[in-house]
Image: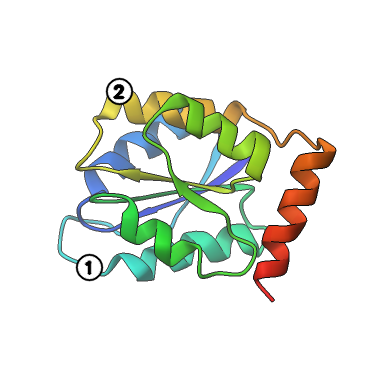
Amino acid sequence: MTIAIGSDHAGYWLKEIIKKHLLDQNLAVIDCGTDSEEPVDYPDFARKVALAVKDKHAQRGIMLCGSGVGASVAANKIKGIRAAICHDNYSAHQGVEHDDMNILVLGARIIGASLALELVQTYLKASFSNEERHIRRLEKIKALEH
């Protein structure tokens, strides 16, 4: 599995921890930046992660900013992207299983590294249920993009 990961300056420190964790598991990682704690604009990096997923260069994405809110809003502007802030395990797996979430968004000023790594594992292990009700709902979500 290939994972696209990105952050703004507030999420940079946590992005680096997660990236190392993914590489240690022999997962392919596309680092969409940023590369320091120098202030940057989160929409630029949310766009890069979202396009990597949309264009199928990565199967899943992970995006970090200070709260997770701005990155989530920005990523969801890209057609085909279903990004959500998940700061608990239930949301991290249910978002994939029921809603086919393809970008996990984390707030680096909200959660710590241990919880973030746990959420990443939960997210990556989850798969879409393909249950009829979830497929129907996903089709309705896709229709909203048009």
In the image: residue 105, left or right of residue 29? left
Instruction: State which tag comes first along the sequence, 2 or 1.
Output: 1
Disc ID at residue 114: 2
Q: Quadrant of the N terminus?
A: top right
Residue 124 drawn at (x, y percent): 57, 32
Q: Nearer the viewer, residue 80 or 33?
A: 80
Q: CA distance from mark 2 to mark 1?
A: 25 Å
* Residue at screen point 25% across, 42% down: 108
Q: Secondary structure at mark 2?
A: helix
Q: Nearer the viewer, residue 106 or 2?
A: 106
Q: Is residue 131 above or below residue 102?
A: above
Disc ID at residue 52: none
Q: Amino acid at mark 2?
A: Ser
Residue 31 drawn at (x, y percent): 43, 53
- Image coloring type: rainbow
Q: How dense is the environment of label 1, judged by Cα within 10 Å: few (below 14), some, or many (20 and up)?
A: some
In the image: residue 46, left or right of residue 2? left
* Residue at screen point 55% across, 69% down: 78
Q: Residue furthest bottom?
A: 146
Q: Nearer the viewer, residue 5 or 104?
A: 104
Q: How dense is the environment of label 2, judged by Cα within 10 Å: few (below 14), some, or many (20 and up)?
A: few
Q: Amino acid at mark 1?
A: Val
Residue 74 drawn at (x, y percent): 42, 66
Q: Is residue 93 above or below residue 96?
A: above
Residue 26 visible here: no
Residue 143 drawn at (x, y percent): 73, 67
Q: Residue furthest right?
A: 132
Q: Nearer the viewer, residue 28 or 103?
A: 103
Find out whether the residues at labels 2 and 1 contact each other: C-beta distance under 8 Å: no
In the image: residue 100, left or right of residue 87? right
Q: Which residue is mark 1?
A: 40
How many marks can you see?
A: 2
